[in-house]
Amino acid sequence: MKYYVLIAVVMLAGCATPQQRAAYEMQQHQQAQALQVALAGQCDAPTADLMRRQFAGDTGQNEQEKQAFRLAYLDKVGDPMFRSCYRMAWESYTAQQRLEDLRRRDYYDDWWYGPRPWGWWRRW
């Protein structure tokens, strides 16, 4: 019986509380927004600033300022040059992440799958 209690305590200690999950999801969301702003900053700094303000909720005090911000935001983000530059920055970022994953996989392959007795497996 002692072991069941010990196992239950260990399993429950490993679970995250709803507050911890919410904090983790909020952190993930903020990191995704920061990445979007950084990629936009590679293309156009004023547009990146507008995106940062949009994510922060700083769109204006009254309805007229909010409408002016919304129109400026849509004008900047909808620009075909910005969209193509942003798409290229995003594709470059994803390709860079894939390359890092491939390098990491090649380096840590033995850790995940165990050593292989043959030498040609690294070339595949």
Image: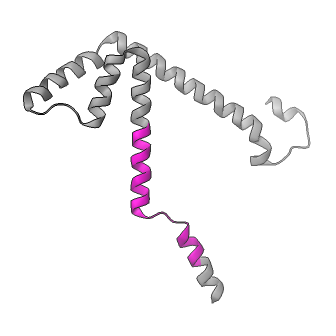
**Which one is nearer the viewer's eye here, 120 or 84?**
84
Q: Which residues are magenta?
A: 8-31
Q: Quadrant of residue 10?
A: bottom right
Q: Is residue 80 above or below residue 108?
A: above
Q: Is residue 70 above or below residue 12?
A: above
Q: Quadrant of residue 5?
A: bottom right
Residue 17 counted in the magenta span: yes
Q: Is 41 situated left or right of 57 in this image? A: right
Q: Quadrant of residue 124?
A: top right
x, y percent for residue 29: 40, 42
x, y percent for residue 37: 39, 27
Q: Is 124 situated left or right of 40 in this image? A: right
Tell me how many marks there are: 0
Magenta-drawn stretch, dominant element (helix, strand or loop): helix
Q: Is 72 situated left or right of 16 in this image? A: left
Furthest toward the top, the residue is: 81
x, y percent for residue 4: 61, 83
Furthest toward the front, the residue is: 61
x, y percent for residue 86: 41, 18
Residue 41 counted in the magenta span: no
State the residue at coordinates (40%, 40%): 30
Q: Quadrant of the N terminus?
A: bottom right
State the residue at coordinates (37%, 15%): 44
Q: Is residue 86 above or below residue 16?
A: above
**Which one is nearer the viewer's eye here, 26 or 112?**
26
Figure coloring: one colour
